[in-house]
Image (cartoon, coloured by chain):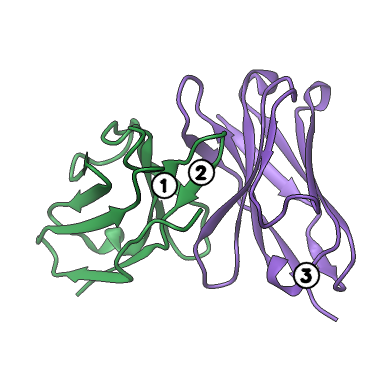
Chain colours: A purple, B green
């Protein structure tokens, strides 16, 4: 069974930093492209970052480019998101999502980890 | 890129059919047959309902169907049931390995 489990969220002050993690199981992690998607409270879904299986391709949404960094450690079946220069509008539930093999589709999602940016 | 446009809410009585529209542009939804739909119940992660416009993952009820024409995609729920009450999001590939989501539609079963 495919599982994705995020962690690392919490309360942080504006301008602060946080590192989110996502551990995958039930599939060959290194073979899959991975993404981060966030959802502000009561709002819709927003894609924010993509990384290829071998991490040689990385893309970001304009809203986080230059502040967030996506990375992965295939030996530990782990995906990461480093969040820097956090702002109040970064407050959201952050999901990691697997990209379906052979299709540009997010097929499995974790339960999310909540990041709250507030003083 | 701007979010895809969905109606904020759609409602129907049990047993009825409803359709949710999702409108994009020629740069995203109109350029790729890479439209997906997600169902999200309160407090839960999104669940994939359709991919590549109309492909249904195993386990998704055949009461759900999806299609696309031009810059607009649609999700239809037939034989509406109480458990279908949820938020639904469309999503399109937007090029350069990025995704564009719709703003979401709240489905209410009357």
Image quadrant occupied by the C terminus of chain B: bottom left
Chain letter of the residue beneath label 2 in the structure image: B
* Mark 2 burial class by Cα count in 10 Å: few <14, some 14-19, many 20+: many
Chain letter of the residue beneath label 1 in the structure image: B
When the figure is inspected, residue A43 is found, relative to residue A21, above or below; the finding is below
The circle on residue A2 is: none
Q: Which of the two residues, B42 or A102, is positioned nearer the viewer here?
A: A102
Q: Secondary structure at mark 1?
A: strand
- Please name the residue that numbered disc 2 is placed on: B99
Question: Where residue B37 sits: x, y (%)?
Answer: 36, 46
Q: Which of the two residues, B26 or B42, is positioned nearer the viewer here?
A: B26
Q: Is residue B51 left or right of residue A12?
A: left
Residue at the spot x=35%, y=36% of the render?
B31
In the image, are marks 3 and 1 on the same chain? Answer: no
Question: Where residue B51 sits: x, y (%)?
Answer: 36, 35
* Mark 1 burial class by Cα count in 10 Å: few <14, some 14-19, many 20+: many
Question: Where residue B100 sits: x, y (%)?
Answer: 48, 49
Q: Is residue A21 left or right of residue B88?
A: right
Residue at the spot x=9%, y=61% of the render?
B16
Residue at the spot x=51%, y=53% of the render?
B1
Q: Is residue A72 left or right of residue A40?
A: right
Tell me, yes or no, whether the two marked residues, 1 and 2, touch with CB atoms within 8 Å: yes
Give the spatial CA distance, label 1 vs label 2: 7 Å
């Amino acid at each position: 069974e495919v599982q994705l489990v995020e962690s690392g969220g919490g309360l942080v002050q504006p301008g602060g930093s946080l590192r989110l993690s996502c551990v995958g199981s039930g599939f060959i992690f290194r073979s899959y492209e991975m993404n981060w998607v966030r959802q502000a409270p009561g709002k819709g879904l927003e894609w924010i970052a993509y990384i290829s299986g071998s991490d040689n391709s990385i893309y970001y949404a304009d809203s986080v480019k230059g502040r967030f960094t996506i990375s992965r450690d295939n030996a530990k079946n782990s995906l990461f998101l480093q969040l820097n220069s956090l702002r109040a509008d970064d407050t959201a539930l952050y999901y990691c999502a697997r990209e379906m093999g052979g299709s540009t589709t997010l097929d499995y999602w974790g339960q999310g980890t909540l990041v709250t940016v507030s003083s | 890129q701007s979010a895809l446009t969905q109606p904020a809410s759609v409602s129907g009585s049990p047993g009825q059919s409803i359709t949710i529209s999702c409108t994009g542009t020629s740069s995203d939804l109109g350029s790729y047959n890479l439209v997906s739909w997600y169902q999200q119940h309160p407090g839960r992660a999104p669940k994939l309902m359709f991919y590549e416009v109309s492909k249904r993952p195993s386990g998704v009820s055949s009461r759900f169907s999806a299609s696309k024409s031009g810059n607009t995609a649609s999700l239809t729920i037939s034989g509406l049931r109480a458990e279908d009450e949820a938020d639904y999001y469309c999503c399109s590939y937007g090029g350069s390995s990025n995704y564009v989501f719709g703003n979401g539609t709240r489905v209410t079963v009357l």
